[in-house]
Image (cartoon, grey):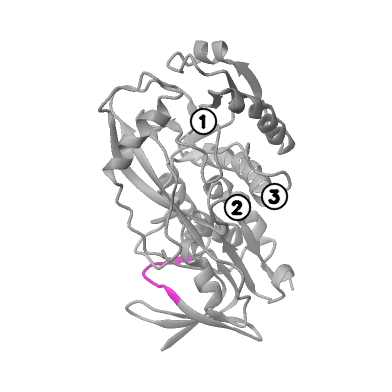
């Protein structure tokens, strides 16, 4: 089996893996990204709503809160400087029941504690003046002007280009199957059509759905015996006709997702979702991404809580994604697990597990964070 040497290997060419590799390449590191698929960002990264999250929902002090806010600021700057289309269209989080309205001030306080800018509360009348298609039942809305949408695929390509411009490589159809920690770093073995061995000073495991599996396949690295992956499938739906809203419209969220929200993409297409479907505990990648048409019918009642004018027969199944979670149904929302040598004690290994939303918004900040962990002992 042929063998190569490199400085840093990043496993996974999704948004986070590419952002990590970019940060390391910009710092002058020799970086190789190993991707099992035939292209970049083929799983979670490309199966989302392309929303730039403000950082409203996440517990204060959590990695999700800190990295989302930092990542969102970096992302807008990045898109502006590199010609990636992004639009800060703003977002309304709407309350349509008394209980929801009573919970909005706590969400506002949490978001302000997370250092989210320019937030305010408006009543239902003001919300309908700005967005006339909103339901007469909307009692109040939290306004987030810094939320937005962007061209995620152009972003991924830009990250890949920066890695390669700085001498890094993104290698496709090269799944990592096993590894072991050595005195000098980590030795990896790959599968695919041409298996090789790669010796690296540091390995960043950003393999998305397979991150825990790969962590456990590296002998001498942390094994996380008490960790179990769970999966939430989120299906998206599109609507026909001109958009009824100019902003993102989100209902008050639940424990599994941010609710069946509405977004208008850069092409002017209205998109609903994702919904939240916990998969069986025995489920594992690769997943079935087909969208059950019957789930589209379930959308009407939920969306009409805030958009009563949604016409019959206009919702169609679009696409789906699967969120990797390290918590189960009914548990408190989990945080990102970004575990480097200071946490697990193994030099040269950084594992990123359970990187779900807001991972895309946070990606540049995660890249910064991980680059700072690589050489720690």
Residue at horizontal 65 percent and vertical 41 percent from the top:
69
Q: Which of marks 1 and 2 is nearer the N terminus?
A: 1
Query: Please, is residue 346 above or below residue 23 in the view?
Result: below
Instruction: Name the N-terminal-most of marks 2 and 3.
Output: 3
Name the image quarter holding the C terminus: bottom right
- Residue 251: numbered disc: 1
Residue occupying the point 45% across, 24% down: 305
In the depicted structure, whether residue 86 falls above or below residue 377: above
Q: Determine whether the residue tagged by mark 3 lies in a helix, strand or loop.
A: loop
User: Looking at the image, which is closer to me, 72 or 123?
Assistant: 123
Outermost residue to the left: 313
Crowding around mark 1 (Cα neighbors within 10 Å: few <14, some 14 to 19, many 20+) is many
Which of the two discs, 1 and 3, labels the residue nearer the N terminus? 3
Q: Residue 331 carries which label?
A: 2
The part of the chain drawn in magenta is: 169-176
The relative height of residue 234 versus residue 279 in the rendered view (above or below) is: above
The residue where tag 3 is placed is 62
Can residue 375 be seen here?
no
Residue 346 visible within the image:
yes
- For the residue labelled by badge 2, is the local secondary structure a helix, a strand or a loop? loop
**Could you give the CA–CA distance between mark 1 and mark 3, rounded to whole angstroms?**
23 Å
Q: Give the total of numbered labels.
A: 3
Label 1–label 3 contact, CB within 8 A:
no
């Amino acid at each position: 089996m042929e063998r190569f040497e490199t400085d840093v290997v990043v496993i996974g060419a999704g948004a986070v893996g590419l952002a990590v590799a970019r940060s390391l390449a910009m710092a002058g590191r020799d970086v190789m990204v190993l991707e099992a698929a035939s292209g970049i960002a083929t799983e979670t990264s490309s199966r989302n709503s392309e929303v730039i999250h403000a950082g409203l929902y996440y517990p204060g002090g959590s990695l999700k809160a800190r990295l989302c806010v930092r990542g969102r600021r970096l992302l807008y700057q990045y898109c502006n400087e590199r010609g990636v289309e992004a639009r800060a269209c703003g977002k309304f989080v709407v309350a349509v029941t008394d209980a929801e309205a009573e919970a909005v001030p706590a969400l506002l306080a949490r978001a302000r504690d997370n250092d989210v800018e320019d937030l305010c509360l408006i009543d239902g009348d003001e919300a309908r003046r700005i967005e006339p298609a909103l339901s007469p039942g909307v009692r109040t809305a939290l306004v987030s002007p810094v939320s937005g949408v962007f061209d995620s695929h152009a972003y991924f390509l830009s990250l890949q280009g920066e890695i390669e411009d700085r001498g890094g490589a993104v290698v496709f159809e090269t799944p990592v199957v096993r590894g072991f920690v050595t005195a000098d770093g980590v030795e990896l073995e790959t599968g695919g059509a041409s298996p090789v061995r790669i010796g690296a000073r540091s390995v960043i495991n950003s393999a998305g759905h397979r991150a825990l599996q790969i962590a456990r396949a590296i002998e001498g690295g942390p094994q996380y015996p008490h960790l179990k992956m769970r999966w939430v499938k989120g299906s998206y739906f599109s609507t026909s006709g001109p958009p009824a809203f100019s902003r993102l419209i989100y209902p008050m969220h639940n424990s599994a997702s941010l609710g069946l929200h509405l977004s208008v993409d850069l092409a002017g297409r209205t998109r609903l979702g994702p919904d939240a479907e916990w998969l069986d505990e025995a489920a594992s990648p690769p997943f079935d991404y087909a969208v059950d048409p019957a789930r589209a019918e379930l959308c009407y009642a939920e969306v009409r809580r805030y958009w009563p004018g949604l016409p019959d027969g206009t919702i169609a199944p679009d696409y789906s994604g699967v969120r990797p979670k390290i918590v189960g149904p009914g548990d408190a929302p989990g945080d990102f697990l970004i575990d480097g040598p200071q946490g697990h004690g193994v030099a040269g290994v950084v594992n990123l597990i359970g990187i779900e939303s807001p991972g895309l918004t946070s990606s540049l900040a995660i890249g910064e964070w991980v680059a700072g962990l690589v050489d720690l002992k």
